[in-house]
Amino acid sequence: VESIMRPIRAPRALALWRRHASSMPSWATINPETMSASAPAIGRNLVNGQWVDAAAQHVVIDPLNGDGFIRVPNTTIAEVQPFVERMRSCPRSGLHNPIKNVDRYNMLGAVMADGARELAKPHVASFFSRLIQRVVPKSAAQCTGEPTVVRKFMENYSCDQVRYLARSFGIPGDHMGQTTTGIRMPFGGVAVITPFNFPLEIPALQTLSALFMGNQPCTKVDWKVAIVMEQFIRMLHHVGLPATDMDYIYADGPVMNELMVQGNCRMCLFTGSQAIADKLTLDLKGRVKLEDAGFDWKILGPDPSEMDFVVWQCDQDAYAFSGQKCSAQSMLIAHEKWIDLGVVDHLRKRASLRSLDDLTCSPVLTWSNASIAEHMDACLQVPGSKLAFGGKPLAGHSVPECYGAWEPTAVYMPIEEILSSESNFALATRELFGPFQVITSYKEGQVDLVLELINRMQNHLTAGVVSNDHQFIERVLGNTINGTTYAGIRARTTAAPQQHWFGPSGDPRSAGIHTPEAIKLCWSSHREIIYDFAPVPGTWEPKTT
């Protein structure tokens, strides 16, 4: 427990980055250590196997000091035609399927094996970790986690594992020579759209998953961080992925929207806000899978124990990377016994260990200080609400004003007041993509009130039920639908590893990531083929029915 309560640092990871800073991968086109306003990194689009520029560029500013340190294509609608043609020209039957071009399953398995070996090289892992930290400043441990998860994912799907994803099944027919076979078919030209917060893990895993099943993806990552995925694609080419297997574009959202509509995109995997998810659903006529907004809750059950560990995990879930995760703990619902034991004060002490100095506090890339303060003040206007801790901007930094720099913050709001009106409920359950959470509490006999609260929420991504009371856990699990739910005294909401499903539930559009089930659900559809080769019986006579 003592080690858990120390300030969060990763000196060994920092030392590793410095040791390998001068050892750049042969395929890399940028240097994370030297890119600056005077020597900016340059990003390029990939279309039909060629790396190309756009007529204009976006300037990406360093989130820690405001310098323009990366220049990337600012692709316009007038420039998307090559991408449109590529998407439209991909066969509906895909680049491969269980009947066509089956050698590609083996090829992709080999690329995964070689790619995992490449990512296992210390200087390559350090390259990606440091590049991630330059564009989305977060702690060393948070940055090293992404290439580690990607490497393990590639190990999991190396060699024969790609073809195992296309496993078919057969059922005997009605007569000799008739067999029914079910196979997994790709969609064809598809799209992957991912946000800024995980610039390697999410786009890499979803793009590879699309490729596994035979699709030809066009991938767009938030252009402020998209240089990371570009470098990963260059690594894939280095280890054998055909350059024409996928396209990659730097663009604003409306440009990508137009590309998909003109390109008749057969399926889009979208990770991002609910409003855009709903627009894409209409524009693409339902051909979407979504990992949309995540207002995620955690319940502390009626049996408090392991206070230090639970507090540490709550702090990680709410404030690691300053809460900029779709799985971040947005609401903590604590039984009165936890409140009486001082859990809120323990949380305050733990959160106070975070600092911009070691990036355990991070710049907030989608909320300014003014907008965070406005939302916090609105929450405090609800009767009975109070500031639990935090509530102020960070001081002594050079984070540009367009970004936020805010203390880990919590506002206590009574559960009865949250449920008393639609406006209070909407306010308390608004996702603030930053270091902010709502804390509420419930008494013995108010579990139904808790269930009402969490089932009124619109998004059902992750959740945690912290308890060792089996009956309590089963009651909550049996009456909720969050797609990735952790249960037990060590329950969390964040840091999903590569071996289990991560995604929302309760919506036919729900996407998933990591597992074979997720890959097949998102990136393929079922096809039934009925083989019927038997000779027609000599006694057969035609009858009109």
Image: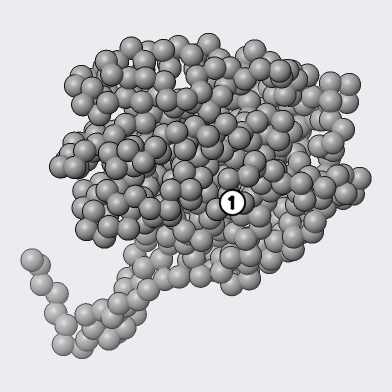
Is 273 left or right of 124, judged from the image as shown? left
**What residue did someone put label 1 on?**
2
In front here: 287 or 4? 4
The mark total stands at 1
Q: Name, please, the residue furthest toward the left.
A: 545
In front here: 519 or 263? 519
In front here: 147 or 356? 356
Say which element carries label 1. loop
Is 134 left or right of 411, judged from the image as shown? right
Residue at 72%, 53% (x, y): give it: 236
- Work out whether residue 412 can be spotted: yes
Is 530 placed above or below 425 here? Answer: below
- The C terminus lies in which quarter of the figure? bottom left
Residue at 58%, 17% (x, y): give it: 393
Is 364 left or right of 44, judged from the image as shown? left
- Report x, y in % for residue 122: 80, 56
How crowded is the residue under tag 1: few (<14 C-alpha within 10 Å), some, or many (20+)?
Answer: few
- Report x, y in % for residue 394: 62, 20
